[in-house]
Image (spheres, rainbow, N blue to C red):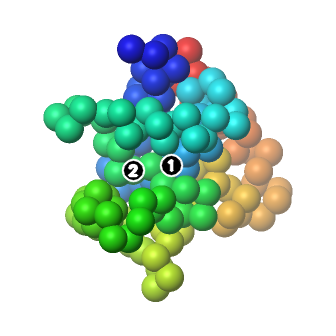
Amino acid sequence: MNPFYRRIYRVVRHIPKGRVATYGVVARLAGRPGAARTVGWALSALPDEGDVPWWRVVNAAGRISLSPHDHAAVVQRALLLREGVRFAPGGAVNLGTYGWPTEAYDSVAAPAHTRAASSRRSRRLKGLRT
């Protein structure tokens, strides 16, 4: 298996129930900022019976990336709803509320003076990058 895919899967396994992460954040935590598409490819390569909670990964707008007519998109939405994730009327998840790790989305919901503290907290996630 591709070593980068393995790191992606490790990061996705750490996303808590009821939270989401974007493809870009997963790529950054897996050690390759800018490799969001590769995260998508890795998740699409998962076997059906895997233990990676792929449904907890959304795009940068907080939306499910699959076509709304795709059965997997319906499954993803249902799994997120079951975990308590709520969607806005337009279909997006509020990343400021449900985004993981919280500090990755602080700019969405928090004032600028709290961002310095969140960068200190982000060091705790360093272990996921190895």
Q: Nearer the viewer, residue 107 or 10?
A: 10
User: Residue lying farthest bottom?
Assistant: 89
Q: Which residue is tagged 2?
A: 56
What separation in Å lies between label 1 and label 2 (alpha carbons)? 6 Å
Left or right of 43 on screen, residue 105 = right
Q: Position of residue 33 (x, y in %)?
A: 69, 33
Left or right of 130 on screen, residue 51 = left
Name the image quarter holding residue 13. Answer: top left
- Assess disc 2: are there few (<14), some (14-19) or many (≥20) residues with their C-alpha within 10 Å of its C-alpha: many
Q: Residue at x 76, y 51 (%)?
A: 115
Quarter holding the N terminus is top left
Disc ID at residue 5:
none
Q: Residue at x 60, y 41 (%)?
A: 36
Asked if the residue under mark 2 is in contact with the one under mark 1, i.e. CB atoms within 8 Å, the reply is: yes
Q: Which residue is tagged 1?
A: 21
Say what secondary structure mark 2 lies in. helix
Q: Residue at x 33, y 71 (%)?
A: 69
Q: Amino acid at mark 2?
A: Arg
